[in-house]
Each structure stands twice: as C-alpha cells, then as structure tokens.
Image: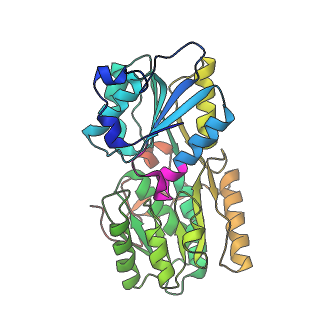
C-alpha cells in the first residue's frame, strides 16, 4: 500500500516524474494490479474518509498478492482533484475510486480521457462505460436514530448538523424526523448547514448553536467527531457518523451509522481481475450489508430492543421509511397516502417534511 500526500502527489504531475525509476516503476505482467483511492478528508478524520480507508485495507487483505492499493487524502472537490485522478490513471492504476460527491464531473472528464481505466464514483449519479457509481442508503440508519431520539428526547426537539444541501443530506434529515415522529408525532428537527463535509471547527460551532436552541439530542451528517464531543461535554446524547465513534463519547453516544465499504470494494476489484467489471449503479443498505448500526449503548434495554426491531423491519422491507402521506414544511402533501417514494425521487429529493425548521441554502 502506498500513501501519497496530496501536495507531494500533485508535484509529480509531469510525465518525466511519473516515469522516473523509484517513484512509479513500469508494471510487469506478474506485478499486482494497482488500485487507487481518492479521499476528501484525512484518513484520521475518524469518520467518512477513515471508514473508506478501512474498506480499502479490507479489500487489499482479501486479495493479498493480487492487488496493491494507494490513496491520496485531503483532495478538494475542485479542479485540483482532476489532476489527481489523471495522475493515478497515467501511473498504471487500473481501477480508481473517488469517494466524494463533488468529484463527479471531474471524474467524468478523466474517464473519457482514459477509456481503458475503470473508475467508480461514490454518491454520484453520472456514469460512463468505464465509470460506475455506488452509494449507501444512509437514510435507513437515520430513521433508526430518529426512533431512538423519539424515545429519549425530553423536549421533542432534535438537532442535525448538516453538511451541504444535496439529496443525500435531505433524505437523512427527513428520515430522522420520520423515525422520531413515529414515536412522538409532535417531534421537531432543527438543522444547521455548514457548507462543508469536513470542518471540525464549523461542526462544533453548529452543534453548540443547536444545543443552545433547546435541542436535547444531536445527530450529524458531517465527517468529524466534533459534534459528538460537543454533546458529550454537555452530557447530552448524540449519534456518531460513518464509523463507530464511541471512543469520543463513551457515556453519551447512542449508536452510529457504520458504512461498510470493504465488501463492495473487494467485489468490484474481483470483477476487474476477472475481466467482468461493468459500469453499474449500486445503492445498498442494511439488506446488502453496506450499512450497519454500531452497538446500541447508553439507553434503556427496551429502547435498544425497539431499535433492533426497526433495523430488522427495514432490512426485510417491512418498513420502507418514505411512505405517504408526507407533507412538506407548508403542510402540502407531496407523497400521497400509501405511496412509497421511488428511488428516482429519493435521488433528487430537495423537499423537507413538516416539522423540520429552517430552509435549505
């Protein structure tokens, strides 16, 4: 495995540097296949990028001797990322994973330039013959969190530290409140959008502001443990994000959505090695083993039992999460009674349900 710092990596963009002996050698037939990963944040964020890196390590271990992986961290969702993807492609990587939504259009350009290289984009929706997309139904875990919050909140008001107002985040806020309202129909959700996926300072400030507004349980759709730590400092319950963050709040974390990327990465790399890789769109959740809940802690046994049953109901399909009637913030019905929201609508969702306070920026 190679870890390439972003600044050092982008300094190697010239063709002569890429071909230099001792930096990136010419591939031999017997060499392991090179697989690349590009991360938005540091692998030490203990959240989103960290969990992707766990998956990378699992795939490399499962395919030991057949592949060698490398990653570039701290790559922004900006034109600079295109150079990183191009450099990985030019240096012999046969499959490249981009793990943030904002990489989408840049990856499309690079995929067109390197038709013999395979690319996979996490959370995106644009594909090409050599560019696949993959995602997790994060909203399923948000609903479970909401059920727990509905049982434990004394004020009936929860706080949500949001990143950017893309459909994935809108799904999460709605699902959380739907879970909460399944217990307490009068429950409300307040949110603050920080316009970043990873910014510990902004995440912490947003958490403090939400708790100051009377929220007595907190969740997040951002990458660092900062909101969880803020809640812990006030002895208030909260949920971790992307990975089990219990070490940051051992007495107050209730559970966390845990993203399981390892199985997916292993499966897709195997397909590459077998010559059967195709451009597909994958959106998995509890049923596919791509999403699991961290152990239910710091709650009464009956609440943990209810949360466990909720996971089972979503896994089996008994609970579809987004089932009408659903009303927007003005009280207008946007999903009629008995209807289940289809994946196409979910993928572009920009409507907040009644009970959520605040507007999307």
Query: Of residues 115 and 187, which is closer to you in this image?
Result: 115
Query: Of residues 204 and 128, which is closer to you in this image?
Result: 204
4 up-or-down from 294: above or below? above
At x 53%, y 77%, the residue is 185
Query: Of residues 11 and 87, which is closer to you in this image?
Result: 11
At x 72%, y 64%, the residue is 309
Outermost residue toward the front? 22
Outermost residue toward the top? 29
Q: Position of residue 60 (x, y in %)?
A: 62, 35
User: Is any atom of residue 330 visible in this view?
Assistant: no
325 up-or-down from 153: above or below? above
Magenta segment boundaries in residue numbering = 39-51
Image quarter in which the C terminus is found = bottom left
Query: Of residues 307 and 321, which is closer to you in this image?
Result: 307
Q: Position of residue 42 (x, y in %)?
A: 43, 52
User: Is any atom of residue 34 visible in this view?
Assistant: yes
184 up-or-down from 89: above or below? below
């Amino acid at each position: 495995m190679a870890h390439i710092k972003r600044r050092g990596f982008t300094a190697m963009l010239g063709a002569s540097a890429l071909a230099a002996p001792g930096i990136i050698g010419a591939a031999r037939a017997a060499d392991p296949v090179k697989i690349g990963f590009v991360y938005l944040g540091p692998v030490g964020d203990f959240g989103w990028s960290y969990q992707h890196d766990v998956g990378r390590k699992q795939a490399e271990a499962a395919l030991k001797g057949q592949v060698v992986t490398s990653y570039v961290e701290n790559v922004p969702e900006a034109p600079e990322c295109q150079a990183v993807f191009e450099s990985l492609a030019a240096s012999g990587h046969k499959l490249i994973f981009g793990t943030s939504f904002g990489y989408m259009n840049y990856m499309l350009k690079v995929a067109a330039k390197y038709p013999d290289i395979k690319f996979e984009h996490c959370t995106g929706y644009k594909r090409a013959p050599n560019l696949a997309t993959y995602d997790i139904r994060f909203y399923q875990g948000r609903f479970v969190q909401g059920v727990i919050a509905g049982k434990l909140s004394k004020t009936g008001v929860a706080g949500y530290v949001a990143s950017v107002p893309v459909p994935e985040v809108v799904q999460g806020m709605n699902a959380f409140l739907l879970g909460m309202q399944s217990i307490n129909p009068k429950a409300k959700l307040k949110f603050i959008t920080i316009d970043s996926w990873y910014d510990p300072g902004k995440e912490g400030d947003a958490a403090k502001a939400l708790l100051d507004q009377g929220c007595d349980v907190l969740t997040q759709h951002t990458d660092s443990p900062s909101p969880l730590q803020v809640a812990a400092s006030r002895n208030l319950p909260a949920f971790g994000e992307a990975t089990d963050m219990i070490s940051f709040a051992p007495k107050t974390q209730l559970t966390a959505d845990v993203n399981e990327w390892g199985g997916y990465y292993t499966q897709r790399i195997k397909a590459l090695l077998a010559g059967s890789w195709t451009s597909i769109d994958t959106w998995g959740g509890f049923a596919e083993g791509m999403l699991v809940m961290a152990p239910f802690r710091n709650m009464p046994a009956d609440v943990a039992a209810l949360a466990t049953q909720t996971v089972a109901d979503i896994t089996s399909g008994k609970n579809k999460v987004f089932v009408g009637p659903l009303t927007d913030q003005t009280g207008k019905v946007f999903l009629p009674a008995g209807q289940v929201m289809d994946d196409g609508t979910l993928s572009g969702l920009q409507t907040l349900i009644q009970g959520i306070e605040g507007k999307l920026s």
